[in-house]
Amino acid sequence: MWKKVAGGYDVDDDDALQVLETLDLHGIAKYIKSDACKNIFIMAGAGISTSAGIPDFRSPDTGLYANLARLKLPYPEAVFDITFFRNNPKPFYTLAHELAPGKFRPTLTHSFIRLLAEKNYLHTCFTQNIDTLERRAGVPADKIIEAHGSFATQHCIKCKAEYPDDEMREKIKNQELPICNKCKGYVKPDIVFFGEGLPDEFFSSLEHLRSADLLIVMGTSLTVHPFASLTEIVDESCPRLLLNLDLVGGWGSRTNDVSCLMPCDDAVRKICELLGWEEELDALWADTANTVVSFSKDVEDTQEPKAEKAAEVPKEEVQETAKKVEKQAKVDLLEEFVGQLAEKIAGVGLDDEKETQPSQADKKEAPAESSDSNKPSHRDAAKDVEKSQDKEDPAASEDVETIDPASKEGSEDAQAARKSEPKTSSE
């Protein structure tokens, strides 16, 4: 067992194996450069997308839920409730128009994840986000596990038939309800709503965490389970790095825990500076400049083709642009965002949807959604994660806690589940 000086104090022989020379970003950078670090795993939450202009969910003043409370919903989380959606999908699709993939540019942090992949360090990126920005940043699809689903694919909630991507895009763009071409049921993106089970690939990938040489947790409050429990699956001696605004999840309880409490974009830039990767990071982020597309009804939806060879951009200019994006006025953006939602969703009620809903007969035939409670078990370390899913299935995005589907007038069991929901902290 090594004896190292870490953070100004000696590491005793009685402690767990000290892998890092120092418990800071310098120690992390030196470890990444060593032969010991080959498989890096990422756990990403909504905090990595806020600098793109996408609000997180639970910040008290700027979070999406805090502002959706002003709209005409029985409760804010109803917008991601499968039972509410079956009766009235319009609020969700109003929100989907505002959050649609392509409207936001990936952040510097997304480009950092891609950089890890290009350097063959990235094993798997587990993300709670539904925004698909990892994909748009160029992270290989086979390296991404979207724990709460995403807008990438969509199916009918009644017959489960797949719905064409191009048709879905047009429906969201034109703020129309997508209806199944086969059974005329409602179509929903493959986002995990309250009352639905997590994707199979999430559970089948858990065992790989045992091979992690480094776990990087970024932009999450680690309050939504079973996702939050992934931090406990990696080996006790595996270094864990937290990039977040706040200290969360009992961080610091392990010998090789390191925390960096600052915006994720700032943190990944510091890491790349220490690794000598800063120019590569800026180049990858500059490559995302043309990924934003128009969702306006009045403007033809086109995207500028990328030049065969990207024009050289001065390093100082790229860095200055990155800093400006990172310092966007989130509150101002959110006020505009919520204002648009309020105008579109005002007056929408269950009775307003009668003409657009499937027939009552169709509703009765709709198959019940299962909570996927009988997931196959994995290694011992993952069993606790599996058990926790029976209690709570996360939904929709980072920090969307899993509850039994219910409106204010729902079943007693559903109301009880909502009352027992643990309080969460903002990202």
Image: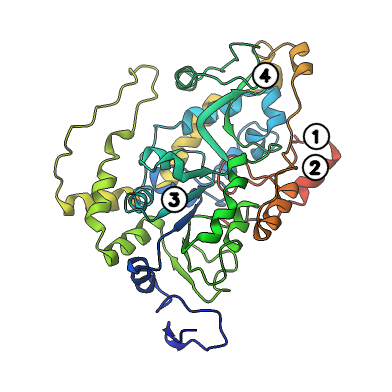
Nearest to the observer: residue 384 or residue 69: 384
Marks 4 and 3: which is nearer the front?
4
Q: Could you tell me the amino acid type at mark 4? A: Cys
Q: Is residue 235 above or below residue 409?
A: below
Which x, y percent locates residue 202? 59, 45
Q: Say few, some or many: other residues with alpha carbon within 10 Å of mark 3 (under 14 / 14 to 19 / 20 or more).
A: many
- Asked if residue 244 shows in the view, the reply is no
N-term-proximal mark, 3 vs 2: 3
Among numbered discs 2 and 1, the one appearing first in the sequence = 1
| Residues at circles 3 and 2 in contact by the CB criterion of under 8 Å | no
Mark 4 and mark 3 residues within 8 Å of each other at the beta carbon: no
Q: Amino acid at mark 2?
A: Gln
Looking at this view, is 181 or 374 the one in front? Answer: 374
In the rendered structure, which amino acid carries the disc numbered 1?
Gly
Viewer-nearest of discs 3 and 2: 3
**Residue of label 2:** 415
Quick one: which residue is furthest to the right in this view? 412
* Residue to which mark 1 is pinned: 410
Of callouts 4 and 1, which one flags the residue occurring earlier in the amino acid sequence?
4
Mark 1 is surrounded, within 10 Å at the Cα level, by few (under 14), some (14 to 19) or many (20 or more) other residues, namely few
What residue does disc 4 label? 159
- Of the two numbered discs 1 and 3 on the same chain, state the one appearing first in sequence: 3
3D distance between C-alphas at marks 3 and 2: 32 Å
Query: In the rendering, at what x and y percent does residue 231 appear?
Result: 57, 61
